[in-house]
Amino acid sequence: MDKIEYCVVIKFFVKEDLKPNEIHLKFIKVYGELSPSFSTIKKWAAEFKHGCNNLEDDPRKGRPKSATTPEIIEQVHDMLLDDWRMKVCEIAEIIGISKERVGYILHEELDMRKLCTRCVPRLLTADQKCTSMKNL
């Protein structure tokens, strides 16, 4: 079930004057493991009881994370394929994102690490590491 569908059901049960623990039991009976947690049901029930009619989450403050899009990840990867010796700060400056985001993309998304001024995949064997060191 979608989150909005859960909210609609919770709102209906709140209008029926059911307590959050009763709503939770009904969810478990019908949906089993797919039911939302008690704390989620309690939070939404309180919201609806206090007059909130919005089923969507309120927009959050701050800038959305837009630096880890597939296009930017691909752009970082292409830049490294062209020049393995690029510095993180150079990549960040060219693309226009922070150094921290570039580091995240390299380490978490592309699964790479620095090896003697070159970004290489982490899963190199000992022979491959020696070969890459000789090519410097």
Image (cartoon, grey):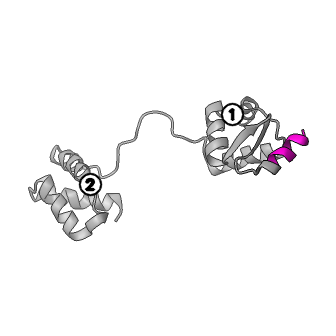
Query: Residue lying farthest front?
Result: 126
Secondary structure at badge 2 equals loop
Q: Which residues are magenta?
A: 128-136
Q: Residue at x 31, y 64 (%)?
A: 34
Q: Residue at x 66, y 37 (%)?
A: 102
Q: Judge the density around disc 2: few (<14), some (14-19), many (≥20) Cα neighbours within 10 Å.
A: few
Q: CA distance from mark 2 to mark 1?
A: 40 Å
Query: Residue beneath label 1, please?
Result: 96
Residue 41, percent across and down?
Answer: 22, 52
Q: Judge the density around disc 1: few (<14), some (14-19), many (≥20) Cα neighbours within 10 Å.
A: few
Query: Residue lying farthest right?
Result: 135
Residue 8, percent across and down?
Answer: 25, 59
Q: Main secondary structure of the magenta part?
A: helix
Of pointers 2 and 1, the one earlier in the residue sequence = 2
Mark drawn on residue 65: none
Residue 122, percent across and down?
Answer: 70, 47
The picture quadrant where one finds residue 79 is: top right
Q: Residue at x 67, y 42 (%)?
A: 106
Query: Residue lying farthest bottom?
Result: 30
The picture quadrant where one finds residue 33 is: bottom left
Secondary structure at badge 1 equals loop
Residue 108, percent across and down?
Answer: 61, 45
